[in-house]
Image (cartoon, rainbow, N blue to C red):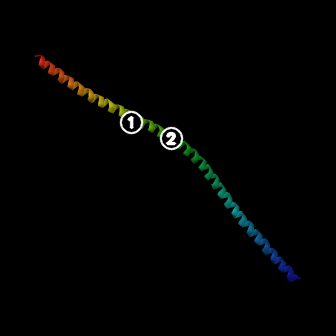
């Protein structure tokens, strides 16, 4: 009976040791979980900041693209109007030269 008691005591000691080992492993996993939860919270915070910044950049970019498009439209319209002015100027110059020649010929004929 004493041998059985000693065996039971040994089993009990091993069981207590195994339970303590499991508790230590659980505590380590708890620490790892806490560390990763902190990292997750930080990443979520960073993500929120970056998402907000991305929205701001997208809005700013949209305004700048719209502004650039307005500039481009104005430039095209101005260049087209300027081209018409040049064409009109050339026509006017040609008419003026023709009239000048015509007046000069009439003057010569009148002499």
Q: How many residues crowd mark 1 within 10 Å: few (<14), some (14–19), many (20+)?
A: few
Residue lying farthest left? 111
Q: Quadrant of the N terminus?
A: bottom right
Rendered residue at 15%/19% (across/down): 106
Residue 28 shown left or right of residue 74 in the figure: right
Q: Quadrant of the C terminus?
A: top left
How many numbered discs sit on the rendered protein? Answer: 2
- Asked where in the image residue 22 lies, by quadrant, the reply is bottom right
Which secondary structure lies at badge 2? helix
Identify residue for label 1: 76
Tell whether label 1 touches label 2 (CB within 8 Å).
Answer: no
> Considering only order in the chain, which callout, 1 or 2, is on the residue closer to the N terminus?
2
Which of the two residues, 6 or 75, is positioned nearer the viewer here? 75
Real-space Cα distance between discs 2 and 1? Answer: 21 Å
Which secondary structure lies at badge 1? helix
Residue 97: give x, y in percent of width and height.
Answer: 21, 26
| Whether residue 107 is situated above or below residue 4 in the rendered picture | above
| Whether residue 62 is situated above or below residue 12 in the rendered picture | above
- Asked where in the image residue 90 lies, by quadrant, the reply is top left
Report the mark closest to the observer, 2 or 1.
1
| Whether residue 51 is situated above or below residue 4 in the rendered picture | above
Residue 12 shown left or right of residue 76 in the figure: right
- Circle on res. 62: 2
Residue 9 shown left or right of residue 89 in the figure: right
Residue 8: give x, y in percent of width and height.
Answer: 84, 78
Q: How many residues crowd mark 2 within 10 Å: few (<14), some (14–19), many (20+)?
A: few
Rendered residue at 59%/50% (across/down): 47
Residue lying farthest top? 110
Residue 104: give x, y in percent of width and height.
Answer: 15, 21
Rendered residue at 61%/53% (across/down): 43
- Circle on res. 86: none
Rendered residue at 76%/72% (across/down): 18
């Amino acid at each position: 009976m004493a041998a059985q008691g000693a065996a039971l005591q040994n089993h009990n000691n091993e069981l207590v040791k195994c339970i303590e080992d499991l508790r230590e492993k659980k505590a380590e996993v708890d620490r790892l979980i806490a560390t990763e939860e902190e990292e997750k919270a930080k990443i979520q915070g960073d993500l929120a900041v970056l998402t907000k910044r991305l929205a701001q950049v997208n809005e700013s970019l949209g305004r700048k693209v719209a502004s650039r498009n307005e500039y481009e439209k104005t430039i095209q319209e101005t260049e087209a109007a300027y081209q018409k002015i040049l064409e009109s100027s050339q026509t006017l110059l040609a008419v003026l030269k023709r009239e000048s020649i015509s007046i000069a010929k009439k003057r010569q004929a009148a002499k």
